[in-house]
Image: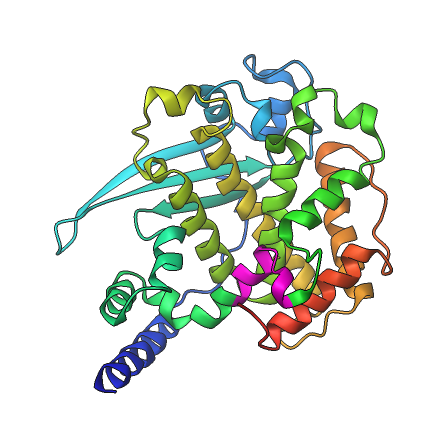
């Protein structure tokens, strides 16, 4: 009992400190980074990219369009920073990534720290493991309920929501199926792979929804613990040769994900304002269909491809809107 009271007290203090010091949400800024505007590069000034240029209003990135990490660095600015060791003797590092497009710049900062595996593992651990996690990342403890809701939305939970439950990935997959202009969309054959539209749609759509339903800070936290779990070397840039040349699990994909996460958060903030979304919003099938169609408009604008729109009676729309409402009401793993 004493341990439980102690943990509650620490959590309460951490929660107050966290939210008293949480900065305002970041906004995309006018381009100030030293790399060329990616719109100019996609118009043909970058020699290393494949011959088919992307539209001048392009923002989101497709990982499969880059042949190497050097190709990617012609589009985004990557800076590795060593911040020294902490009181426990752990060496801290961070990577700062900037992307300029259409006159706007987003910045993603990934620091060393806990990853998705640590958070999932501690669920089955004892009291002191949870206390250790608290001191490593008070944000996770203070927002543990919302994080559980987000992880429920991100994974199929047939035992909770019935057979053929839907998750973020299913929304992205449905958007790929909705592409109408197949001839334009798949000029590059690898665009149809998991590292093409599907991966970009998955990251951007999920980050937009998390930002609109919860907050940009939570969306960013979920994105970062996921990327650190997949490849912790991202913060130092010290990759093995095998990681560099791996056709699928390489740093190009992860750095593209980090940038796409930022654009997804920007979309989430705009759509939250447009649809007047709050934490108490009831997600009707009509609202979710309209919301996802707005994201498809963004993809049309980014990639110059056309989509079939979602309609409220689509099975995936009915199931996922119902899941959002149940999860937000407290029905989660």
- Tell me where residue 22 sits by quadrant: bottom left
Q: Residue at x 25, y 87 (%)?
A: 1
> Range of the magenta residues?
149-160
Residue 275 in sight here: no
Rendering coords of residue 255 (x, y %): 46, 35
- Tell me where residue 23 sits by quadrant: bottom left
Q: Residue at x 66, y 58 (%)?
A: 270
Q: Residue at x 43, y 30 (%)?
A: 251
| Horizontal arrangement in the rendering, residue 110 relative to residue 279 (left or right) | left
Rendering coords of residue 222 (x, y %): 47, 55
| Horizontal arrangement in the rendering, residue 242 relative to residue 220 (left or right) | left
Q: Is residue 150 magenta?
A: yes
In the rendered view, would you say 122 is above or below 236? below
Residue 100 in sight here: yes
Q: Residue at x 68, y 58 (%)?
A: 165
Q: Main secondary structure of the magenta part?
A: helix
In the rendered view, would you say 284 is above or below 66? below
Rendering coords of residue 100 (x, y %): 54, 36
| Horizontal arrangement in the rendering, residue 287 relative to residue 154 (left or right) | right
In the rendered view, would you say 78 is above or below 2? above
Is 155 or 266 nearer to us in this picture?
155
In the rendered view, would you say 333 is above or below 91? below
Coloring applied to the structure: rainbow
Rendering coords of residue 241 (x, y %): 34, 19
Is 142 or 126 nearer to us in this picture?
126
| Horizontal arrangement in the rendering, residue 189 relative to residue 8 (left or right) | right
């Amino acid at each position: 009992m004493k341990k439980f009271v102690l943990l509650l007290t620490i959590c309460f203090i951490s929660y107050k400190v966290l939210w008293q010091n949480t900065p305002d949400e970041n906004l995309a800024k006018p381009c100030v980074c030293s790399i060329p505007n990616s719109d100019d590069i996609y118009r043909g000034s970058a020699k290393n990219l494949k011959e088919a240029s992307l539209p001048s209003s392009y923002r989101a990135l497709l990982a499969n369009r880059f042949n190497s990490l050097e190709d990617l660095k012609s589009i985004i600015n990557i800076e590795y920073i060593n911040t020294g060791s902490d009181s426990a003797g752990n060496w801290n590092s961070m990577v700062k990534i900037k992307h300029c497009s259409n006159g706007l710049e987003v910045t993603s900062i990934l620091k060393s720290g806990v990853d998705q595996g640590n958070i999932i593992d501690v669920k089955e651990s004892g009291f002191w493991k949870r206390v250790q996690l608290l001191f490593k990342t008070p944000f996770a403890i203070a927002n543990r309920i919302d994080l559980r809701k987000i992880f429920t939305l991100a994974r199929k939970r047939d035992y909770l929501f019935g057979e053929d439950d839907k998750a973020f990935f299913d929304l992205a997959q449905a958007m790929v199926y909705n592409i109408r202009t197949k001839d334009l969309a798949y000029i590059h054959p690898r665009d149809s792979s998991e590292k093409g539209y599907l991966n970009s749609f998955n990251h951007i759509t999920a980050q937009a929804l998390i930002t609109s339903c919860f907050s940009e800070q939570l969306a960013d936290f979920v994105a970062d613990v996921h990327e650190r779990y997949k490849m912790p070397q991202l913060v130092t840039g010290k990759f093995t040769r095998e990681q560099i040349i791996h056709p699928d699990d390489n740093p190009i994909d992860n750095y593209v994900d980090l940038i796409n996460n930022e654009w997804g958060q920007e979309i989430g903030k705009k759509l939250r304002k447009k649809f007047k979304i709050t934490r108490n919003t009831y997600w009707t099938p009509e609202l979710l269909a309209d919301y996802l169609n707005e994201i498809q408009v963004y993809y049309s604008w980014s990639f110059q491809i056309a989509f079939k729109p979602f309609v409220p009676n689509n099975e995936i729309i009915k199931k996922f809107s119902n899941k959002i409402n149940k999860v937000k009401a407290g029905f989660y793993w």
